[in-house]
Amino acid sequence: ENVGEEVYVHILNHAKKYVHIMTPYLILDNGMLDTLTRAAKSGIEVCIIMPHIPDKWYAFAVAKTYYRELIEAGVNIYEFTPGFVHAKVFVSDDDTATVGTVNLDYRSLYLHFECGAYMYSNDVLHDVEQDFKETLKQCQEITKESCDKYPKGKMLVGKMLRLIAPLM
């Protein structure tokens, strides 16, 4: 079983109000892309915080190739402007969260033995959501217009790298 993927999909599919996500990497397969966009299209507030300054340029180039499609589906994307954010957090509806090592990328979801703490109906959920909100204050929102300003050459490189994304 792909436990990391199952937990993330479960949170997205059972949310009623919001799902707030922090992840350093965004390398999605079609299933996870569909799940994220379906949640947003159904009225769930889906927000993703990514780093503004990456640690791996190639992973960041691939992540940028998903931004427009996610934004057009209603997902809100933000970049943490002070630098690199390495948190792996999903928090939803003030009742569910997971914090751990599972990135939103192929290797974490399908190949690695990642771990995390799953929390349900626990007082600590308020702290996880509060941390998300405090981090969001240091972010810039990514818009369709800012996607248009991303250099075409870098976007092409990112799209070519998607062909080998499972290796990243």
Image: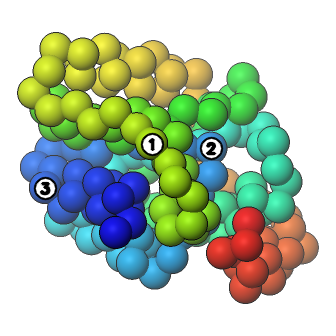
Residue shown at the point (64%, 32%) measured from the top left = 85
State the separation of the CA atoms marked 2 and 3. 24 Å
- The residue type indicated by label 1 comes to Cys
Residue shown at the point (40%, 38%) measured from the top left = 116
Image quadrant holding the C terminus, namely bottom right
Location of residue 124 by image quarter: top left
Q: Residues within 10 Å of mark 1 (few under 14, many from 20)?
A: some
Residue 67 x %, y %:
57, 62
- The residue type indicated by label 2 comes to Pro
Front position in the image: 3 or 80? 3
In the picture, the disc for residue 24 is 2
Q: Residues within 10 Å of mark 2 (few under 14, many from 20)?
A: many
Most distant residue in the right direction: 153
Residue topped by disc 1: 115
Left or right for 143, reference 55: left
Q: Earlier in the sequence, mark 2 or mark 3?
A: 3
Q: Earlier in the sequence, mark 1 or mark 3?
A: 3
Secondary structure type for disc 1: loop
Residue 6 x %, y %:
30, 62
- The residue type indicated by label 3 comes to His
Residue 66 x %, y %:
58, 68
In the picture, the disc for residue 14 is 3
